[in-house]
Image: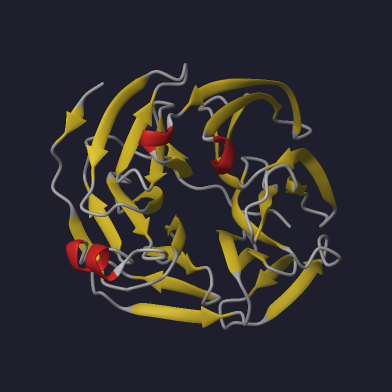
Amino acid sequence: MRTIATEIELVQSANTTLAEGPVWDPRSSELLWVDIPGGVLHRLDPSSGRDRTLSVGQHLGAVAMRRAGGYVAALRDGIALLSEDGELRLISDVEADRPTHRFNDGKCDAAGRFWAGTMRFDDVRGSATLYRVDPDHSVTPMVTGVGLSNGLGWSVDGTVMYYIDTLERSIDAFDFAPDTGGLSNRRRLVSLAPDDGYPDGMTVDRDGFLWVALYQGGAIRRYSPAGELARTIDLPVSQPTSCAFGGPDLMDLYITTATQDLSKAQLEAEPLAGGVLRCRPGAQGRPENAFQG
């Protein structure tokens, strides 16, 4: 393991309770990120600092680009399509009967399926689910008995899916069938110790390495496809939530952060908390997949 001293830059001082889900949108050269409790999608142009926002009126766990334009969104109430001008159309209220839950992180696979998982508001283990949303808008539960569904990613060849259950402090791998979206052979890739913090959002670079945000761990870790710790980037905040590569060369690593549950003293010690950070760690990301539906 190497701890790397990397220059960390504040891109947006958002002072957000829970910023999450960064996605680089090459269509507009913007960084998409969500304010989960505020129910707001931010579309940040890092070159100018312009931030366009769309409010959905409820918890917004994640967004992904949609090939037909606009976005697909994981909400408190279910899965929706969101237009560029803010029109919202719910396509599935799959957990409408579970008011104790909301959707959390989500991403698309190479075939354009949207994967999104849930969590309980009170963080009770074992009651959440990871769903697959196909282009025809059908929704299938793929992983049940989850604590807090979080980061997702796929291997470079598309045959392995990586998955984080935050409450279990685990990163698991599944054999993934690209043609059908099927999962099999679940196994533990990484188990984190309590002192490490909680694994949260993640991204996979062009070399197949996983970059994982450690919530309450104050760091981003890079793991090999075999689960070996290759690198640690220490951050000036204790609660990074997720990360994504962006910029014209996909070599800027954008990091979302949170202020929730921080004391006044901690907030004073972490003036960048709740904002969007950026560094250039010397690795290159891959273009994000978009929803086919």
Q: Position of residue 68 (x, y in %)?
A: 65, 64
- Quarter of the image for the N terminus: give it: top left
- Vertical comparison of 288 with 99: above or below: above
Camera-nearest residue between 103 and 71: 103
Q: Position of residue 46 (x, y in %)?
A: 27, 66
Tell me the residue at 41%/67% (across/down). 28
Q: In the figure, residue 144 lies in which quadrant?
A: top right
Q: Position of residue 252 (x, y in %)?
A: 27, 49
Camera-nearest residue between 85 and 80: 80
Tell me the residue at 32%/73% (across/down). 15
Tell me the residue at 37%/48% (across/down). 216
Describe residue 254's horizontal placement relative to residue 17 as left or right. Answer: left
- Vertical comparison of 123 with 228: above or below: below
Q: Is residue 185 visible?
A: yes
Tell me the residue at 62%/47% (across/down). 148
- Quarter of the image for the C terminus: give it: bottom right
Describe residue 143's horizontal placement relative to residue 150 as left or right. Answer: right
Q: Position of residue 136 (x, y in %)?
A: 83, 55
- Vertical comparison of 146 with 54: above or below: above
Q: Is residue 69 visible?
A: no
